[in-house]
Image (tube, helix red, strand yellow):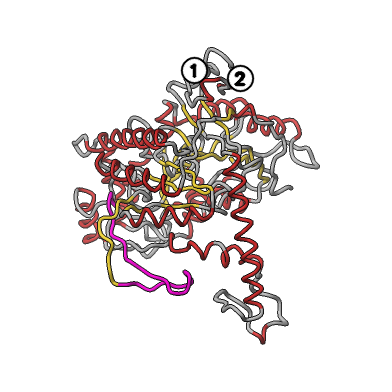
Amino acid sequence: MRPEPGGCCCRRPVRANGCVANGEVPNGYVRSSAAAAGQIHHVTEDGGLYKRPFNEAFEETPMLVAVLTYVGYGVLTLFGYLRDFLRHWRIEKCHHATEREEQKDFVSLYQDFENFYTRNLYMRIRDNWNRPICSVPGARVDIMERQSHDYNWSFKYTGNIIKDVINMGSYNYLGFARNSGSCQEAAAKVLEEYGAGVCSTRQEIGNLDKHEELEKLVASFLGVEAAMTYGMGFATNSMNIPALVGKGCLILSDELNHASLVLGARLSGATIRIFKHNNMQSLEKLLKDAIVYGQPRTRRPWKKILILVEGIYSMEGSIVRLPEVIALKKKYKAYLYLDEAHSIGALGPSGRGVVDYFGLDPEDVDVMMGTFTKSFSASGGYIGGKKELIDYLRTHSHSAVYATSMSPPVVEQIITSMKCIMGQDGTSLGKECVQQLAENTRYFRRRLKEMGFIIYGNEDSPVVPLMLYMPAKIGAFGREMLKRNIGVVVVGFPATPIIESRARFCLSAAHTKEILDTALKEIDEVGDLLQLKYSRHRLVPLLDRPFDETTYEETED
């Protein structure tokens, strides 16, 4: 869950780190006829911060589509209240959690209105989520067939298996999710030698030589002094941020940050202020205000100012404007926490993430966080940085002190795949996977745009959101694609703004051109069937939007 974006949901910026001959505006944004036609050009600016093109687009939602989307949710809401009325008078059977009669006089455990969305909107399309697979989540998967006879309140398995479904939803970016090959063999060998679990924390008797080896390898891979690994990616954020900041500190968080970052920030007790997504003007204004005004009421200087950003934003497909964030961080003497859950392995010439992608120095990022759950096809997360930082976290992080150590076979999966990416296995397979993912990403995005779909994000991001908008099309798209043997992820409110429902494709190096062409052909057909080709190539420059100087503040001293 993420904080709801501020401002109008139906107006999105086009961001490009460059300009054209006419219509130049500051900060590398484009306001020109070329931009309006969907053509984004690149030049370096801001002292040459960018060493490569940075093309990112968020096309404007057509007004008619926005209106019809609101109307669709309005109709669903009206029918929801009608059905709740029928349930109240026991005309329609109610399946959701309710109080027992003998508990009516007690404090309510269930709030009917809080469950309104689940009962009346989510249940209609619940069959699009939690589909059980029964194979390795590679380029193709097997899905267990299920049916519902009570409008998705419960499911029964038919016993049939839907074979060889093209997998366009898993975070298997580099294709290491396999049940054969060097990773599987190494993990199986370690499983036989060490067993599946450690049954202790790292600080007691759960610190294996494999854990030490992994941490040294991660530090080398990232180009930092030291690193520490954790058994759960979500907890890497939520349990480590409170160890780094507390009362009297200020957190500046991107409005689209992941739920783990949001939770960690809230648990820390620090003051939280939200800046607009990837908007350097908004971030700099908050930094200036923090320096000038200090803490509320007392006006004392903040103990620390910590900027929280992600490498790739998993719902938008956008890439952080890291060179500018680092420049602002240095200018205002703040700290930078970078979450590379989706970007590590998936970006950069050598797969070392968004720092590698921009050709930056890892030392400019104070806290480098990432997960092993995506590009490495394992589980867990890591924190990398200065040795002093890692030594501090070993004794102050709840994830380090109280959590059970990582499973040895999982550790070996990470070690083997990371060595493959680094070329330490004696082959070029890792480099080829990184290059193949980049090629697949650009090809898939280009073809979807040519078909007329509205696609969000950066042209180099393997996360590809295709906009659906209307609530009825969320379920329809997922079902129609599965009929055509393609598994996709569809996303709606509250994971996205209410009128920005979407399908999210995740590209993989395991996808061949034939697989992508098959998927594109079916997506094109379903797009025509459901009338999803909304694109008119009207791209909205960020600085054409009125800049709202208000910010969200969640905690004050």
Please tell me which residue is depicted at 66% across the width and 45% down the height of the picture.
272
Q: Which residue is mark 1?
A: 44
Q: Position of residue 418 (x, y in %)?
A: 30, 42
Residue 458 highlighted magenta (yes or no): no
- Asked if 269 appears above or below 142 in the picture, the reply is above
Please tell me which residue is depicted at 42% across the width and 32% down the height of the picture.
459
Q: Work out which residue is located at the far bottom of the displayed protein and give it.
A: 102
Q: Amino acid at mark 1?
A: Thr
Nearest the eye: 313 or 151? 151
Q: Position of residue 403 (x, y in %)?
A: 45, 59
CB contact under 8 Å: marks 2 and 1: no
Question: Mark 1 or mark 2, which is nearer the start of the sequence?
Answer: 2
Residue 151 highlighted magenta (yes or no): yes
Q: Which residue is mark 2?
A: 26
- Callout 1: SS: loop
Please tell me which residue is depicted at 58% across the width and 37% down the height of the picture.
277
- Residue numbers of the magenta segment: 138-158
Nearest the eye: 486 or 542? 486
Left or right position of 444 against 1? left
* C-alpha span from label 2 to label 1: 12 Å
How packed mark 2 is, by other alpha carbons closer than 10 Å (few <14, some 14-19, many 20 or more), is few
Label of residue 155 in the image: none
Q: Amino acid at mark 2?
A: Pro
- Asked if 99 appears above or below 164 in the picture, the reply is below
How packed mark 1 is, by other alpha carbons closer than 10 Å (few <14, some 14-19, many 20 or more), is some
Nearest the eye: 94 or 171? 94
**Residue 160, located in which quarter of the rendered image?**
bottom left
